[in-house]
Image (spheres, rainbow, N blue to C red):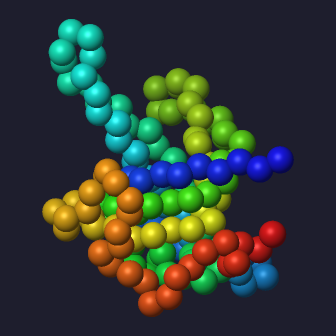
Amino acid sequence: MYQQITLIGNLGGDPEMRYTPSGVPVATFSLAVNKSWTNQEGQKQDKTTWFRVTTWRKQAETVSQYLTKGKQVFVIGEIEEARPWTDKEGNNRASLEVTALTVRFLGGRGEGGSSYGPPTPTEAPPEYVGEQDIPF
């Protein structure tokens, strides 16, 4: 079995960098994916879905070094099991967790990035980082 998810969105905050006890770099960031449409009454509707993206090894180091809040990225990854949590008001919520296989840097807000069409990197990391950096 195999599943894959493709996301284009903006970082909700700066990546959080940490290391496993054995010294493997891990970076996580929240990603807001926006959807807009017009309903049957002709009113514009917007919906934002949040994902928690985890990157490993060299990819984690590159993400931590180059990405900041608001930057737009293209992510290909595997969706993990949703994790339940409770918000401040006591409502049950779920966190959608993604382990990134590939992260491509697009433009950020005000930097000419586009949410449509094929991704065209406008800010490239020093090297391509992909699934070969995943530790499993």
Numbered label tally: 0
Vertical position of residue 135 compared to residue 127: above or below: above
**Residue situated in front as seen by the camera: 23 or 110:** 110
Q: Residue furthest top?
A: 41
Q: Is residue 104 left or right of residue 85?
A: left
Q: Is residue 94 left or right of residue 45?
A: right
Q: Can you tell which quarter of the image residue 40 is in?
A: top left
Q: Residue at x 81, y 69 (%)?
A: 136
Percent of width and height locating residue 102? 57, 68
Percent of width and height locating residue 128? 52, 82
**Residue situated in front as seen by the camera: 120 or 108:** 120
Q: Is residue 14 left or right of residue 26?
A: left
Can residue 16 be seen in this snapshot? no
Q: Residue at x 18, y 15 (%)?
A: 42
Q: Residue at x 53, y 25 (%)?
A: 90
Vertical position of residue 105 compared to residue 83: above or below: below
Vertical position of residue 103 compared to residue 3: above or below: below
Q: Can you tell which quarter of the image residue 70 is in?
A: bottom left
Vertical position of residue 10 compared to residue 48: above or below: below
Q: Residue furthest bottom?
A: 126
Can residue 1 be seen in this snapshot? yes
Q: Is residue 17 left or right of residue 81?
A: left
Percent of width and height locating residue 135? 77, 74
Q: Residue at x 34, y 54 (%)?
A: 117
**Residue situated in front as seen by the camera: 21 or 47:** 47
